[in-house]
Amino acid sequence: MTLNTALDVTYQVPRLLPHASHRVSAVAERPGGKGINVAHVLAALGHEVTATGFAGGPVGSVVRGLLAQSPGVVDGLVPCAGNTRRTVAVVDAASGDTTQFNEPGPHITAAEWSRFLARYEDLVHGARAVALCGSLPPGVPVGAYALLVRSARAAGVPVLLDTSGEALRRGVAARPEIIKPNAAELAELTGSRDPLPATRDARRRGAHAVVTSLGPAGLLAATAEGTWQATPPRPLSGNPTGAGDSAVAGLLSAVAEGLDWPARLTRAVALSAATVLAPVAGAFDPRTYEEVRGSVKVTTA
Amino acid sequence: MTLNTALDVTYQVPRLLPHASHRVSAVAERPGGKGINVAHVLAALGHEVTATGFAGGPVGSVVRGLLAQSPGVVDGLVPCAGNTRRTVAVVDAASGDTTQFNEPGPHITAAEWSRFLARYEDLVHGARAVALCGSLPPGVPVGAYALLVRSARAAGVPVLLDTSGEALRRGVAARPEIIKPNAAELAELTGSRDPLPATRDARRRGAHAVVTSLGPAGLLAATAEGTWQATPPRPLSGNPTGAGDSAVAGLLSAVAEGLDWPARLTRAVALSAATVLAPVAGAFDPRTYEEVRGSVKVTTA
């Protein structure tokens, strides 16, 4: 689930010069928002997935049109009056670096939020697992994720929460199955930059399990069954865009299949690695995934 | 007329940092492309205006929707299969500077170009004057403006051409009534950076009159009736976005009303000045226009 869906627009420019005018040499568009990315990876793994959140205005129509063309993801988006946000990623051909601009998203009314809650209730009751991903659009109450976590737990469906800031702080207290912060999000939540104590601290705040992404060093998980670090077989260089979303998809699919923690972490690390190494940003390379998942190292921490 | 219409998107950011991620604090959209800007100024001056060019895809629909809300501009756009381009202007609140990204525009097919020519013929026969503005979208023949200039001249309608590069070079040879290059476009056409000889040289290439914009120094015009420089009453500081388009609208409206060259140049300089001083980029301030046009200085050059 991505409340704040997006149209991800990518511009190629020869070289980014601040305060200059640029001819864009190539334009690409795809549906975006963390939860949409997670849904695409789950679909590629063979799962039935429904994506929900809000879509509205001309940009929302483009997002839904593109979603209709992507195999395996069912459109469960709820209409809103405002225009769905765009994100614009400007890729500099000279350096390969990306400069990112994220629109804030449409203002969601109280009536739209109520309609979303009703749709979410329906969807949760048919689901094996749910991922709640990304930022809250303007107008949605800051305690939204706490409500959505409680609702999934009441239906007996495991819920993974991947957000940041106050939305994460409030959501954790509602006791989600898993949260998956990166180092910066974890530091903001706990006040500590030391991954192992901070991951354990985050767990004491309410999450049943905390899986911290350590970037190229893999994942660190504090769970009721134990504490593990999962590491890719070799250092990876490539495009990290979407690696976190692939890790979420890996964890969620392994939870839905009833796998144990070492198997969940192995799958998440292998999918992340296959995303970093994929030629297209945000996609994962199935052959790399198959190759890497045999050699992920899981150790108790 | 703007062959390559656009949706002009403006992003406000606190500070532009290359290769960083930015939260956009405000988003604004308006229909764009030089000819659309010219049409808005003509409508604000009380003229009946029809805007033509291509519009297609979801972005084209947004442009047409916004155009339908702007009073006085009739939508004469021709549908195309490709998506109308966006321009993204990122305004840095710290410095006030703008970083601009211009998409290339949709590819126009031969059949779409033929449909446009038929529409243009119809519109030209009912017009008092025509302005041909901006770049050519991909697929449109580079000699397009020469064809459109000849067609207007055959109908006895005065035509102003405001473009650059090879499109300008080819268009000038078809003998438009007026071309309005800026200093850089004039230098590219003639090879000279000295405004007066370059303006005269450009006239010898075919245009009946050449009006060169000198930025804050006003306009320099070489015509069959004489050579003039028109200067604003005082140095202007403000946002120059749209000042050139306002000058085109001023020239075209004065031509349509049968005014002489000093009156045409006075109107163009006053409208440019009222655009630079307007609080909103690209609009002109009617009170500044009334105030400035009494004190524009026109001297023979």
Image (cartoon, coloured by chain):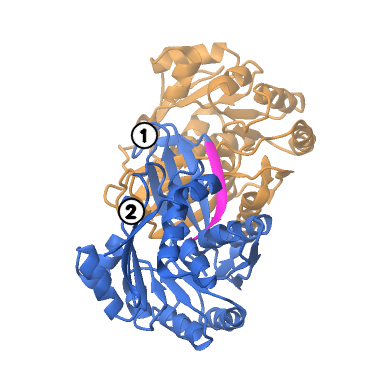
Chain colours: A orange, B blue
B274 to A236, vertically: above or below: below
Tell me which amino acid carries mark 1.
Ser
Q: Please report the bounds of the magenta region as a residue range.
A: B26-34
Q: In which quarter of the image is residue B182?
A: bottom left
Residue at disc 2, secondary structure: helix
Q: Name the residue tied to disc 2.
A: B215
Residue B166 is at least partly visible in this image: yes
Residue A80: x %, y % from top left: 72, 42
Residue B209: x %, y % from top left: 36, 74
Q: Mark 2 lies on which chain?
A: B
Residue farthest to the bottom, as pictured: B154
**A139 in magenta:** no
Q: Name the residue tied to disc 1.
A: B95
Q: Nearer the viewer, residue A142 or B228?
A: B228
Q: Main secondary structure of the magenta part?
A: strand
Q: Marks 1 and 2, Cα distance to the nearest angstrom?
A: 21 Å
Q: Nearer the viewer, residue A155 or B121?
A: B121
Label of residue A265 in the image: none
B154 to A226, vertically: above or below: below
Tell me which amino acid carries mark 2.
Gly
Kindly check if marks 1 and 2 are in contact, taking CB atoms under 8 A apart as contact: no
Residue A135: x %, y % from top left: 57, 31
Q: How busy is the neighbourhood of tag 1: few (under 14 within 10 Å), some, or many (20 plus)? A: few
> Going 77% across and 38% down the picture, which residue do you hit?
A119
Q: Earlier in the sequence, mark 1 or mark 2?
A: 1
- Looking at the rendering, in which quadrant would you find the C terminus of chain B? bottom left
Q: Mark 1 lies on which chain?
A: B
> Going 76% across and 30% down the picture, which residue do you hit?
A110
Residue B261: x %, y % from top left: 41, 69
In the picture, measured across the screen, residue A100 lies left or right of residue A238, that is right
